Image: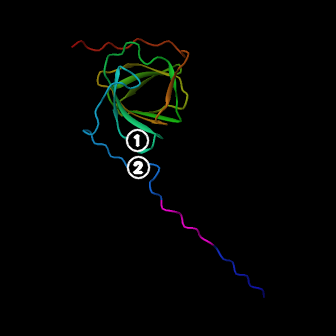
């Protein structure tokens, strides 16, 4: 009987000096709502995810800053993934030709490339938006439907 000996060479994986993503923990006082984001009528609060993921994902809170006048206009995003979680208040969107009311507690997954228009929202509207990649682009598109009028905010 012939016996063969087989030797396996196991290569150790080198220790990585740094991982592709970092741990991140942002508390309410760590970052603040600021203007200068994608829409001037919203304020944005960075949650540190874009930095922690090296730009793979962005997570930010978005809240109403001014009453809706023209809304976002018809657009789509060049993104692989987008989710909106309504934290406070409500917003009305058009997704293609369908009006959609998104209220506190609702979760919306916006499939890549869907045409949409945020045209109305409450004064207390606030949502968490998670998008990949972090530097996603917005592209204006042809209208998919007529847009209803926004709800006027109470005069203060």
Question: Residue placed at 37% from the left, 34% from the top?
Answer: 60
- Secondary element at tag 2: loop
- Secondary element at tag 1: helix
What residue did someone put label 1 on?
A: 51
Q: Quadrant of the N terminus?
A: bottom right
Asked whether, in this view, residue 142 is left or right of residue 53, the answer is right
Is 13 inside the magenta-drawn segment?
A: yes
> Residue furthest toward the bottom?
1
Is 100 inside the magenta-drawn segment?
A: no
Residue 23, given in percent of the width and then of the height, sits at 38, 50
Q: Quadrant of the C terminus?
A: top left
Question: Residue placed at 32% from the left, 21% from the top?
Answer: 122
Give yes or no for contact between labels 2 and 1 (Cβ–Cβ under 8 Å).
Answer: yes
Relative to 31, residue 20 above or below: below
Residue 22 marker: 2
Relative to 85, residue 39 above or below: above
Classified by dominant secondary structure, the portion drawn in magenta counts as: loop
Residues rendered magenta in the picture: 9-15
Mark sitting earlier along the chain (2/1): 2
Question: Residue placed at 73% from the left, 82% from the top?
Answer: 4
Give the CA distance from mark 2 to mark 1: 8 Å
Residue 132, given in percent of the width and then of the height, sits at 49, 37
Residue 9, given in percent of the width and then of the height, sits at 62, 72
């Amino acid at each position: 009987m012939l016996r063969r000996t087989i030797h396996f060479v196991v290569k150790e994986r080198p220790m990585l000096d740094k991982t592709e993503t970092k741990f991140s923990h942002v508390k309410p006082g760590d970052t603040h709502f600021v203007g200068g984001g994608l829409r001037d009528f919203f304020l944005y609060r960075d949650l540190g995810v874009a930095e922690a993921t090296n730009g793979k994902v962005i997570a930010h809170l978005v809240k109403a800053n001014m009453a809706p006048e023209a809304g976002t206009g018809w657009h789509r995003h060049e993104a692989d993934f987008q989710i909106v979680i309504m934290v406070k208040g409500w917003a009305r969107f058009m997704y293609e030709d369908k009006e959609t009311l998104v209220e506190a507690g609702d979760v919306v997954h916006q499939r890549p490339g869907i045409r949409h228009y945020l045209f109305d929202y409450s004064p207390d509207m606030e949502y968490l938006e998670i998008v990949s990649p972090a530097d996603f682009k917005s592209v204006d598109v042809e209208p998919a439907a007529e847009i209803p009028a926004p709800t006027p905010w109470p005069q203060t």
